[in-house]
Image: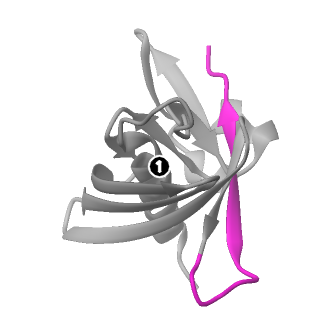
Amino acid sequence: MLDSRGLVTVAALSLSSLLASAGGADAVELDGAWASSADQCDKVFTREGGKLGFTDMSEVYGGGFIIDGKQLIGKFARCTVKARKEDGPNVNLVASCATDIMLSTVQFSLKQLDVNSVARLFPGMEDMEIKYYRCSVK
């Protein structure tokens, strides 16, 4: 089982990768803030001075991540998407990630459920997924 930091890192990396690649008209568009609970967006994200960020206790409310171009930003990790392959609503990503103590390469599989929700898939564990919802942060 992942602790809250691990879950936030995994989530952030996953969505960052989805959005990172430039794509055609059918590309999955993921720029923005994503939370694991749609009704907790205002408790996970904040906007100060026009900059999107995390609240002090964001992980208590399920956490989330921010996608900005090829950057995937979590509360405890920052990733850069290195490769992206789309197959319909499914997106496979490879990202280079850094935390305060570690560098790593991470592979993610995501499925766009609709314009405002995605699921992180875990190959080999078909019944396991984590859903994320797009947030409108003012």
Tell me which residue sits at (74%, 40%) in the image: 40
On screen, residue 40 versus residue 32, left or right, reads right
Tell me which residue sits at (64%, 53%) in the image: 89
Q: Nearer the viewer, residue 32 or 20?
A: 20
- Disc 1 designates what residue? 18
**Residue 130 position by quadrant:** bottom right
SS type, badge 1: helix
Q: Is residue 124 magenta?
A: yes
Give the quarter of the figure containing the N terminus. bottom right
Q: Is residue 103 magenta?
A: no
On screen, residue 85 versus residue 36, left or right, reads left
Q: Is residue 101 visible?
A: yes
Amino acid under disc 1:
Leu
Q: Is residue 74 visible?
A: no
Above or below, comparing residue 37 to residue 109 in the picture: above
Tell me which residue sits at (56%, 46%) in the image: 57
Give the quarter of the figure containing the C terminus. top right
On screen, residue 34 versus residue 37, left or right, reads left
Q: Nearer the viewer, residue 87 or 109?
A: 87
Above or below, comparing residue 89 to residue 27 in the picture: below
**Residue 19 position by quadrant:** top left
User: Residue 102: image x %, image y %?
Assistant: 19, 69
Question: Badge 1 local density, few (<14 within 10 Å), some, or many (20+)?
Answer: many
User: Residue 91: image x %, image y %?
Assistant: 52, 57
Question: Residue furthest toward the top?
Answer: 49
The magenta segment is 122-138
User: Residue 25: image x %, image y %?
Assistant: 53, 29
